[in-house]
């Protein structure tokens, strides 16, 4: 018999070389997901504040997003008015 470690779950498999069958397996002991409950609660409270900060930043960015797009459009429109003879660039679909 020889032992092989499973690449998926890290269990130890005992394999019989004559029959090529798994005779026994040992499942590894998983550590507890939470060691200190108070530390995990404190981490979750801090995560809430971080989420609020990220939400506030994204909200402010979204409010100014329309203004940025409007300025980009105005600049491109001004360029198009200055050079009306310039054809739009060819797209991949236009070459077919």
Image: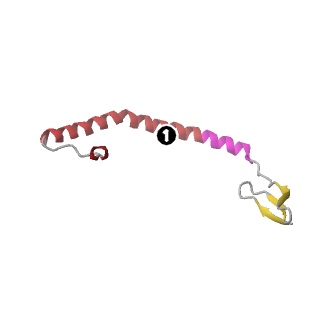
On the image, the x and y values in percent for residue 18 come to: 86, 65
The residue lying toward the viewer, choosing from 81 and 56, is: 81
Q: Main secondary structure of the magenta part?
A: helix
Looking at the image, residue 75 lies above or below residue 13: above
Give the total number of marks visible in the rendering.
1
Mark 1 neighbour density, 10 Å: few (under 14) some (14–19) many (20 or more): few
| Quadrant housing the N terminus | bottom right
On the image, the x and y values in percent for residue 86 come to: 15, 44
24 on left or right of 77: right
Secondary structure category for the residue under label 1 = helix
Q: How is the image coloured?
A: secondary structure
> Residue shown at 49%/40% (left/top)?
54
> Which residue occupies the extreme front position in the image?
96
> Residue shown at 30%/37% (left/top)?
69
49 on left or right of 12: left
On the image, the x and y values in percent for residue 37 come to: 73, 43
Give the image quarter of residue 27. bottom right
> Residue shown at 76%/48% (left/top)?
32
In the rendered structure, which segment of residues is drawn in magenta?
Answer: 33-46
On the image, the x and y values in percent for residue 92 come to: 31, 47
Is 68 contained in the magenta span?
no
**Residue indicated by mark 1:** 54
55 on left or right of 10: left
Give the image quarter of residue 24. bottom right
The residue lying toward the viewer, choosing from 38 and 77, is: 77
């Amino acid at each position: 018999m020889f032992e092989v470690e499973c690449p998926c779950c890290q269990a130890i498999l005992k394999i019989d070389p004559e029959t090529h069958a798994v005779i026994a397996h040992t499942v590894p002991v998983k550590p507890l997901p939470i060691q200190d409950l108070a530390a995990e609660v404190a981490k979750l409270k801090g995560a809430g504040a971080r989420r609020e900060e990220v939400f506030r930043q994204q909200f402010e960015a979204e409010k100014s997003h329309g203004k940025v797009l409007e300025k980009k459009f105005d600049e491109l429109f001004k360029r198009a008015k200055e050079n009306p003879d310039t054809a739009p660039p060819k797209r991949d679909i236009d070459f077919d």
